[in-house]
Amino acid sequence: MQEYLKGLNEKQRIAVEHMDGPLMIVAGAGSGKTKVLTTRIAHLMHNGVDAFNILALTFTNKAAAEMKERVERILGNTEARNLYIGTFHSVFARILRAEANKLGYPNNFTIYDTDDAKSVLKGIINDMNLDDKHYKPAYVYNRISAAKNSLIDPVMYKQDTQIQQEDARSNRPLMGDIYDSYAKRCFKNGAMDFDDLLFKMYILLTNFPEVLAKYQHRFKYILIDEYQDTNLAQYAIIKMMGAVHENICVVGDDAQSIYSFRGATVQNILQFNDDYDDVMTVKLEQNYRSTQSILNVANQVISNNKNQIPKQLWTDNTEGDKIVLVRTMTDNDEGRFVADAITEMKLRNHYANKDFAILYRTNAQSRSFEESLRRMNIPYKLYGGVSFYQRKEVKDFLAYLRIVVNTQDEENLKRIINYPARGIGKTSIEKIMVIANEQDKTFWEVIQDPAAAGLKGAGTSAIEEFVTKIKSFQTQLEKQNAYDVAFAVGKHTGLVQELYNDKSVEGLARYENVQELLNSIKEFTETPDEEGELLDKSLGSYLQQITLLTDADKDSDENQDSVKLMTIHAAKGLEFPCVFNVGLEENLFPSAMSLYDRADLEEERRLFYVAITRAKERLWVTYTNSRYRFGSLIQNDPSRFIEEIPEAYLDKTFTGMSNRPQAQQSSFGNTFNESANRVPSLKKLADKIQQTAKPAAHTPAPNFAANEPHEMEVGMEVEHQKFGFGKILTLEGGANNRIATIQFQQGHGQKKIMLNYARLRIVK
DNA sequence: TGATGCTAACTTTTT
DNA sequence: GTTAGCATCA
């Protein structure tokens, strides 16, 4: 037997050794899915399949990179480089780049990210004299995105009665026209958005049979990861490309389908059996990741969903600890609890920071955890949020590079024509746009000869200078690699200098970001091309891949010892020894937008399932009575998902509804449960009263100077920045973790305050 | 034309 | 609470 087959269980081996024909692998969470996929690829190659004939599609760059690396490791040689492994978007972008001219696009077409697309839409909405409060760019974008993912072009959109009815009902009858203009403007700009990468790929294969035939024969074996997350466009493309050989292997788990908002349809995996003849189906049900406790909870929770492929995950692992349910008073308490629990776990069980992940439903929840971790000096890494590539200075720089490569791109041209300021103002830009429209020319064409276009004044020479500069960069394109051109752009536009001159803290950060960008371009030019196919180190090639990268992909130091903070969506496919699943509250998780539709609610539940199954050893589920949202305090009930966890699997020490003796409480637990001794119903009543009669916030004196924790004594009168004046009733905890119970005035009541965190001033 | 300050919107999830 | 975008002023 081959060495690489030895570590596989029976089911896994069947999936790996099956070579030809359609194969569906239903892979439960933690069942060794990636192992099977990579071993299968290695097995194919071992049996004479040329790496060039294998295509593997994933949803994230990270998954693609990992797969490639693991195949390489199994094979022990560099043949894996010739594999075509990548995300749907990046693989299609690459193919489209090669075939762009057939669709009337430049090879160096620009890829618009979501922000770019929304800004184009905003322009169109304003041009059409529509109210962008009603036709919100984000809404319009989503609607168009959904259309493209369902392979509906603007003409079909306008003809589809159901769609028209929907738009009429939402009082947005002009959606179709906006879509139409948007598609035309993107085309004129030589730009594709994310959805176009799928949609245009579909059009390419449909309209050009010779292109289809080429790729059908090239990709004799196709493997799709996370098949449950594919949408109609992806489905149709795979179906076409795989039609000749039908060696399609899909891997997925219907229970982990969490992208329907992006057009993904579970139906693709549920119906795979009907799509192809003689499908072999393999179910991977042994979980190697989690303890029995964790897995039991996961199974129990997901069983509340109706529509699924029947399977039962099991594990040989130890039972492990119960799932710890935690209730806190506020979102800040929730943050502190987690930071404290991490500290304690590290001490007691010798975990490292990197063993912990804090998973939440929405990015906005990260704040309280960041604050508490920072206070405790626990290093953390935040995923998501504003991406590196979305920062203004990075976008500005990239806009230059994009224009050098594709001058058609009006969006980016407008962005940089007066940056750094060179006296080409709003009026000039509008004038150019009017002329461009009248004469049916691109923005770039008009500014070739500003005088002839009817522009006059000081702006004219500035424009001429700008055009000359861009053109000089373009002459470098052919001979020089991405880094050389980018470096020249940074130097000769004054961009780098301008940021360098700004000595403020933010200015320094911006300068560093641009330097980092330049470094990443350098790295790109110096890394050998992995496909070994085209050693394309041009700027155009760089730009095409950069837009498809996210922060998670950029993160090279995977093993740095830090706590990871991310959304559950971002955590899919990852695993951690200890997981905090936070914010389990109605309206938040499940999200308020999902409460009125069974399918949406089931998707939220699958999301919870994904969150639970990220944990290997320990799992905490936390919720809070009140949290800040929109700047004001709101109260939420505990999530319905909590009730779906059987009592027997729960450790309720930290809920105030203890099912364990008090003695077993750890030192940090009771700090955050002021209500620990109250019955829930009373608590709820108290919340209600508090809601209606919220005490006025205290404003501290301008010269407020806090005292040190060790100065506090029982009986002292103190001033708190938020809660005002109060008297210290008791003091507990060690020297580094003193906790004061304080009776506040003005209706704030009694509170337990951790002196390390709160800023208190001694009055007397 | 540019900078400053205020208001409103923001919170679903991402390639 | 935060931030982006807009309006107003210099």
Image (tube, coloured by chain):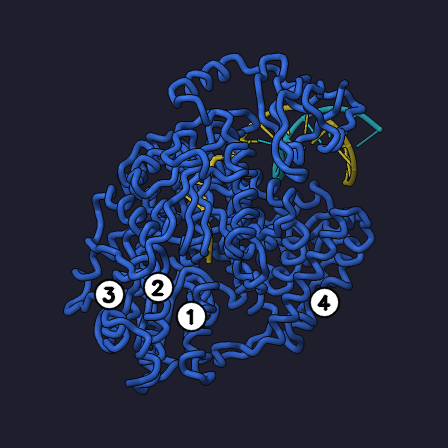
Chain colours: A blue, B yellow, C cyan
Kindly indicate whether the residues beneath marks 1 and 3 are on one polypeptide chain.
yes
Kindly indicate whether the residues beneath marks 3 and 4 are on one polypeptide chain.
yes
As measured in the structure, the alpha-carbon distance from the residue carrying label 1 to the one carrying label 3 is 18 Å
The type of residue carrying mark 3 is: Met
Identify the subunit bearing mark 3: A
Please state the horizontal and vertical placement of residue A703, each as a whole percent of the image: 81, 24
Q: Earlier in the sequence, mark 1 or mark 3?
A: 3
The type of residue carrying mark 4 is: Phe
The 10 Å Cα crowd at callout 3, few under 14, some 14 to 19, many 20 or more, is: many
Q: Quickly name the residue at label 2.
A: A225
As measured in the structure, the alpha-carbon distance from the residue carrying label 1 to the one carrying label 2 is 10 Å
Up-down relation of residue A320 to residue A534 (above or below): above
- The C terminus of chain A lies in quadrant: top right
**Which residue occupies 41% across, 42% down?**
A324
Q: Earlier in the sequence, mark 4 or mark 2?
A: 2
Disc 3 is placed on an element classified as strand
Please state the horizontal and vertical placement of residue A623, each as a whole percent of the image: 44, 35
Q: Quickly name the residue at label 4.
A: A487
Identify the subunit bearing mark 4: A
Tell whether A513 sits left or right of A279: right
Q: How many marks overall? A: 4
As measured in the structure, the alpha-carbon distance from the residue carrying label 1 to the one carrying label 4 is 33 Å
- Asked whether the residues under the numbered discs 1 and 2 touch, taking CB atoms below 8 Å apart as contact, a structural biologist would say yes
The type of residue carrying mark 1 is: Met
**Which residue occupies 61% across, 18% down?**
A743
Q: Quickly name the residue at label 1.
A: A67
Please state the horizontal and vertical placement of residue A575, each as a whole percent of the image: 43, 57
Q: Is residue A151 visible?
A: no
Taking depth in this image into account, of A55 and A105 the one nearest to the observer is A55
Q: Quickly name the residue at label 3.
A: A24
